[in-house]
Image (cartoon, rainbow, N blue to C red):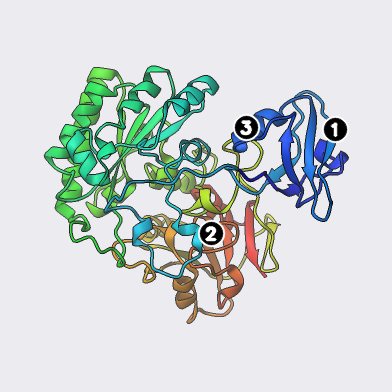
Amino acid sequence: MSAPTVTSVTEASPAARAGLVVGDELLTLNGQEPRDVIDFQQLTDADDLSVMVKRAGAALPRLVKIAKMPGEPFGVEVSSAVFDRIRTCDNHCAFCFIYQLPKGMRKSLYLKDDDYRLSFLYGNFTTLTRFTELDAERILTERLGPLFVSIHSTDPELRAHMLRNPKGATSLRWLSVLLDGGIEVHGQVVVCPGVNDGPALEDTLAGVLDQYPNLATVGVVPLGISQFSHEAEMRAHTTEEAANALDTVTEWQRIYKKTLGRRLVYAADEYYLLAARPFPAARAYDGFPQHENGIGMARAFADGFTNPAKKGPGGVRHGFFASVDAAPAEGYRAPRQHAGTAASTMTDARPRADARPVTVLTGTYGARILRPLLAGHPRDDVRVREVANDFFGGNIGVAGLLTGEDLARALADGVPGTRYLLPDACLNEGRFLDGLTLADLPRPVEVVPTDGTSLRAALDGTSFRSVCAA
């Protein structure tokens, strides 16, 4: 087990007053070794702390007494979310995106986790194939929810086939344990054409009603496949298959509504784009419980853009691999701080109009959403630059997977004097997935939160929070 290492100390906090500094290892908190940031938060909530600190260069660790007011934050961020070993995935799913990464990327991106703690902290989906009784006991005792579970199929044989793991046939028994214990759980079905679509998808949604009716939601999402996939069985949806999936979800929403009093199942935004169908109204998403997973994000974005005063679910997590490259801030699922670099700084845009023409950079899917919205905006000098994802290829079209390489290519022939806006979803701690940063782009860009309200503010010159390239 590695000890949490301090990465930042809040000024005037209890940790700062006690003299803790960046680089300190916190070996114990009130005599206990924290396993993860969940333990860390619970232990540091105590009014008074005794922390065993190991400082670089010191011969021995020392005990530091820290006085805190009730409810006062400890005041540090630490180096990772999990201090003991992350539970890696023992499945070999043909549709797993980790297997579809090219060689030569940074090592952290190849980590394939199946850890319920990262599900709780970041919304990662777990298959429960490495779940244990001790895990269930902790979750039920500490009320660790919501959790996110990959279902894919409720047919044991089909699920084991999709996970390429015989434990896939039985691991959903833990889903029943969690639901019976009152834990909020959201499910996901990644639909692979010719594998678990059509009648198999119908059977899965029927199985949910029969076995797991207490699920909070079920998201139905299409397979994303890159050019680096070597799985002959995996392919992109056709337009007809996307339409059929939407019809299936719509029908089961009706069944669930009649039986359970709620819709329960929701289709990913990509399905509506693939089938060339309009997005449902905001009320059809029942509060956007799976917004971070691309379900209702387009509707929330459009509503936020056209009506900035309307409250919505906000933006998205910063980067596709959010759980890998940065620990959360204080609070289990709190927003993380941006890491400052020489190439990027946090700024507050002044509430004034910017006369420069604007180009909004986005992916293939984002462009389809933005073009009709911008067509109705009063400014006639705003353009959308659709950036093809040549890095991953395949059917990858979401903005969150854009790389610095693709953006650099799109900006190479950019027009001087143009203001370029980029959604923050494609950055994680200041880096794109391919390791490039804002400083590597050939032209300055302004990074705007990935929600419609923020984009509207950027265009209208009202106040918003942004990251600008130097």
Q: Is residue 146 left or right of residue 393?
A: right
Where does the image place residue 351, in percent across and percent down from the top left? 68, 54
Q: Is residue 280 above or below residue 242?
A: above
Which residue is labeled 2 in the image?
Answer: 427
**Dots 3, 1 in contact, CB < 8 A:** no
SS state under label 2: loop
Of the 4 image quadrants, the one containing the C terminus is bottom right
Amino acid type, callout 1 = Lys
| Residue 389 horizontal/vertical position (percent) | 38, 67
Question: Is 215 above or below relative to 453?
Answer: above
Q: Tag 3: residue type?
A: Asp
The answer to the question of whether label 2 and label 1 lie on touching residues, with beta carbons closer than 8 A, is no
Residue 142 visible, this angle: yes
Q: Nearer the viewer, mark 2 or mark 1?
A: 1
In this picture, is 428 found above or below 104?
above
Residue 59 is situated, as x and y percent measured from the top left of the image, at 84, 51
Mark 2: which amino acid? Leu
In front of the other: 341 or 101:
101
Which type of secondary structure does the marked residue at label 3 adopt?
A: helix
User: Which mark sits nearer the N-terminus, 3 or 2?
Assistant: 3
Is 238 displayed left or right of 185 in the figure?
left
Q: Are marks 3 and 2 in contact (CB under 8 Å)?
A: no
> As displayed, is residue 116 above or below residue 20?
above
| Spatial CA span between label 2 and label 1 | 38 Å
Residue 39 disc label? 3
Which residue corresponds to the image point at 87% horizontal and 39% vertical from the top-left?
17
Q: Give the labeled residue for mark 1.
A: 65
Ranked by sequence position, the earlier of labels 2 and 1 is 1
Quadrant of the drawing holding the N terminus: top right
